[in-house]
Image (cartoon, grey):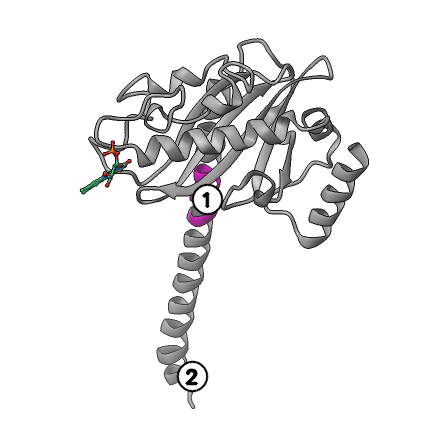
Amino acid sequence: MNNSVLKQVLKPALLLAAFALVGVLLLDTVNRYTLQRIEANERNALMRQLMQVVDKNSHDNDLLHDSAVLPGKLFHSSSDVTIYRARKQGRPSAAIFVTTTDKGYKGSIQIVIGIRMDRSISGVRVVRHNETPGLGDKMELQKSPWVLDFDNTSLQQPALSQWAVKRDGGYFDQFTGATITPRAIVGAVRDVLLWSNEDNHLLSVFSLPTTVGNPSEASDRAVKAEMENAQ
Ligand SMILES: Cc1cc2nc3c(=O)[nH]c(=O)nc-3n(C[C@H](O)[C@H](O)[C@H](O)COP(=O)(O)O)c2cc1C
């Protein structure tokens, strides 16, 4: 191959490769940046949700970096339950449970529940659901104040037997023409309260190892051992 042929073939090939490389690098940078933005947005959204269910000034720690994960079956939750721990000057002040019930009309409903150390509820919000708009979505605060009925309730107020919708003889309103959704939510909140009221479960949450993401089998075992020790 003479010099001019080499130039004719090699130069465009090298140029093309350089462009491709720049393109790949650019795409990778944009990808990373977008992922970081998505993660930051998700963190902010989660933080806003958590702040809605704890009392103002109840904590001075970083909730997002103080959490533990427990197996969902302890709470009849269809997914592992993440618990964010609120502390003031190092002392436990509240625990926020993220639980999921699959008893909704259209499948799973994810609920955030704040519980004070006296085992009263500081707030409940439904953060994810597929219930029917206009019929089964009255648990959204923008649609109705229904979810605020949980504020300051406990297993004593109303009594455990009243932890049901009115249609089932309980304390909580159902929605007009839609009982399945509120029944599922009341049941899920009650299950978390029941667990929190057993022995010293609530306090022992604060000595669980901090977990990020879903528990592996090993950390699952570690958590269970901790819970058994705490009882
Ligand atoms: C298209 C359609 C969508 C519905 N969506 C819901 C829903 O999201 N949540 C709910 O509790 N019930 C929903 N229902 C009503 C339930 O089928 C059921 O009748 C109701 O929850 C029972 O409440 P009731 O005992 O007050 O009638 C829906 C019904 C239909 C026909």
Give the residue at x 39% y 74%. Answer: 13
Q: Position of residue 65 (x, y in %)?
A: 63, 30
Which amino acid type is marked by label 2? Asn
* The magenta stretch spans residue 34: yes
As helix, strand or loop, the secondary structure at mark 2 comes to helix
Q: Which mark is residue 35?
A: 1
Residue at image point 53% right, 18% down: 121
Q: Position of residue 16 (x, y in %)?
A: 37, 68
Q: Residue furthest bottom?
A: 1
Q: Residue furthest top?
A: 57
- The location of residue 153, given as percent across then percent down, is 50, 15
Q: Is residue 62 magenta?
A: no
Magenta-colored span: 31-39
Q: Is residue 204 left or right of residue 100?
A: right
Vertical position of residue 162 compared to residue 18: above or below: above
Q: Residue at x 31, y 25 (%)?
A: 174
* Residue tagged 2: 3
User: For the residues carrying marks 2 and 1, which lies nearer the camera in this image?
Assistant: 1
In this view, the residue in front, 84 or 45, is 84
Q: Is residue 1 visible?
A: yes
Ligand 1 positioned in quadrant: top left
